[in-house]
Image: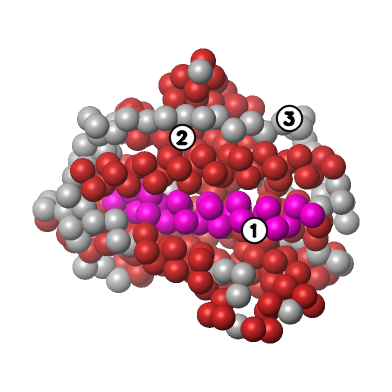
Amino acid sequence: MNAPERQQPRHTLQARRVQFDFASTPLHWLRDDPFSTHIINGIHMLLPAGELWFCRVYNQALPLVKDDTLREDVEGFIRQEAIHSRQHTQAQTYLQAHGLSVSFAERAEWLFGTFLGEAPFGVKWLQRESWKKQWLITRVGLIAAIEHFTGVLGQWAMDNESWELNGDATMVDLFKWHLAEEVEHRTVAYDLFEHLCKTELGFYVSRQALMAIVFPLFLHFIAEGGRQLAGQDPDPRARRLARMLLPQVLVELQKVGKQTRNVPTFGFLLKATARWVSPNFHPIHEGDTEQALAYLARSPAAQAAAMV
């Protein structure tokens, strides 16, 4: 199986060893928008465990990769994701400095370490060699589905101007640096999953089935992370989010996204999911690499890292 012809030149993925100082970052780093602030801040509790899980799965998959170019891309992906994990772990200290518990991170550790681990809940038959490889490929496919959202959200962030107008510069740079790299490596997870699948039909069917799992889980964890933080915020506007059920959070996401442009709307996420369904889908068409690299060239953290 061959991926659609790439429309942008390939380049080598590099890990940028960035650092951020959140000592002066306010709790509501998006001015007068506690809803968007907490929805986005919830990501700090989800990503450290999730991206280390990406690295573990991909390190296990590397021996199965028969294409040298793809192997190089996967290795670059691993290096970038490891740094993403570390920087969002550092951002948890910013939340704690404002008096918020980050115990929700324990749920993420359970999700990626136990539920999606090498032998979920100690299921013995998944440890047999005949099933071990298939479970590994399934987890590679789950990462491909997750990376679809990180890629489209990355392009959304590249196009977005509201964060610079309304947000704390350091936190904005953390997210835009990270999301620019998600655009930069947006094809890797998809190409790896396709490479490991035996047939084109099997690849198509399995990626649809896996997206049916990932999309509702993605919405649940994003909403729940935001709710957990909002419930600890002394601002009554924030505590309103803590009382919302998931459907209410999605309605509010649609409304706030349209009003402030500080978060993508629920409709945006639905449309992105619908594009995945197409047999002709490929993530190369979901973002602009040159635009992402242009941000990375002017990112204060990435510039500082390049000088070290």
How many angstroms separate mark 3 from mark 1 (CA)? Answer: 23 Å
Quarter-of-image position of residue 124 = bottom right
Left-right relation of 247 to 269: left
How many angstroms separate mark 3 from mark 2 (CA)? Answer: 20 Å
Quick check: 93 above or below 299? Answer: below
Residue 67 visible? The answer is yes
Quick check: 133 above or below 268? Answer: below
Q: Residues within 10 Å of mark 1 (few under 14, many from 20)?
A: many
The residue type indicated by label 2 comes to Lys
Number of the label disc, if any, that sits on residue 57:
1
Badge 3 is on which residue?
11
Query: Could you say whether the residue bearing mark 1 is in a helix, strand or loop?
Result: helix
Q: Say which label, 3 or 1, has the lower sequence index.
A: 3
Look at the image and give the residue range highlighted in magenta. 38-63
Query: Could you say whether the residue bearing mark 3 is in a helix, strand or loop?
Result: loop
Left-right relation of 13 to 35: right
Query: Could you say whether the residue bearing mark 2 is in a helix, strand or loop?
Result: helix
Q: Is residue 173 magenta?
A: no
Q: Is residue 54 magenta?
A: yes
Whole-percent x and y of residue 200? Answer: 85, 64
Left-right relation of 60 to 270: right
Badge 2 is on which residue?
176
